[in-house]
Image: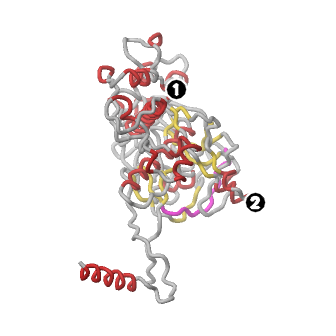
Amino acid sequence: MKKLLLFFLVFLTVFSCGKKNRGELIGVKQKKWFPEKPYGMTLIEGASYIMGKSDDDVANLQNAPAMTVTVPSFYMDETEITNSEYKQFVYWVKDSVALSLLARRASELELGEEQKDGIGEFAFKDSDTSKLSEFQKYMRENYFDLAKPLNWDSDLTWETEDYVDQDYSEIMDSLYLHPDYWYDGQMKIDVTKLKYKFTWFDAEAAAAESKRVRSQFIDRKPYIHHEKGLEIYPDTTVWIKDFIYSYNEPMHNEYFSHPAFQDYPVVGISWKKAVAFCHWRTHYKNSYQRSKGKPPVNSFRLPSEAEWEYAARGGIPSGVYPWGGPYLLNDRACFLANFKPLRGDYAADQAVYTVEAKSYLPNDFNLYNMAGNVAEWTSSSYDSGAYDYVSTLNPNMAVRSEGRKVIRGGSWKDVAYYLRVSSRDYEYSDTSRSYIGFRTIQDYLGTSKVKIK
């Protein structure tokens, strides 16, 4: 036993000596970072390009003069965010709301997660405080929502016949509409209760202040202005509100819910909801990263209009449309995008409303429907004269007080002018439309080593 202990001490001594830096500056060594391409995204390598109208300003808006700008590398979704992908966000929020309500009820009943029968199974994770440090206890007492993680290991059941006890039944039933609001005999979730809350650090505001107090720039209701969170369910009524005296009830009733439309771009999403989705996607991925002991990924976000236009051009300088040429038809006389051609003949491009997100040919960056189908939100605030004063390095004008946000790409109900890669349009951030969707990007961390030839 003594020999074994002596060997262990010698091993520790030799091992620790090997770690000494002999007084040299060698830096802090961390795990090697290998960038991982996010699922469904493509890498857009940064470069300089001529942003703005290189052709005639047909509408004479004078809001996009040509200028040379530079954007760094980033990943971008190959398609618009689909109904199926956004539904994953909705389901996660629905489950988190239910888990939170169940955990609070278990806390009121002084039940712990060790109780496997009944609502106690859904108690806050690590609800036994006997093993917590004083700091952890303080956080739990003073920051209830931050310090008590939900128990995602417990499986929720939404089938009424499988409810585990009376308390569980009361909580789950509270998430549904009152029977007076049902129709066709179907129980309906009260979507107004599906709210998402998140914090956001305003780095630009913090940088502008000489006396910085960090807490002043951590916003718990960013863009939302509502402490209880943001309702994230798509506004399905846009199919009716956007088109007066038009029969679009089938789209209102089925577009987001029916599996026939699962691969179609999600619509009825305001700019604020798109921002919330980006935050959730980051949180969802980093929760997995932490569980595997991996470093966090960079945030998903909406593209600036400079990044969007660069990606839409597909590396083709002075291209009018994402496919480069000035024509809307290919050599077989087929339209190259989903829009409103021929003085309003919606069906001429083989689509009346939206089409599946992977329709038509992608551009040279392998991005689908950068023209037509649905217009797309960007992170940029709209100003007709923005090009005259924004930076030429990764330009973006993001003003929180400006309610108008830039949309790009045109949609299924727009004429060809809005399909041009340089055309700009806007919508208000709290507005949802049947023809506006979005896609996300993620900054590329690090760059490849530069080799001098």
Q: Secondary structure at mark 1?
A: helix
Majority secondary structure in the magenta region = loop
- Image label count: 2
Image point (39%, 82%), residue name: 16
Colour basis = secondary structure
* Amino acid at dot 2: Lys
Question: Image quadrant of residue 14?
Answer: bottom left
Image point (44%, 56%), residue name: 75
Magenta region includes residue 71: yes
Name the residue tied to disc 1.
192
Relative to 140, say whether 324 is above or below: below
**Can you say which quadrant of the picture contains the C terminus?**
bottom left
Image point (59%, 53%), residue name: 53
- Residue 342 in sight from this viewpoint: no
Span of residues in magenta:
61-73
Q: Residues within 10 Å of mark 2 (few under 14, many from 20)?
A: few
In this view, the mark in front (1 or 2): 2
Name the residue tied to disc 2.
211
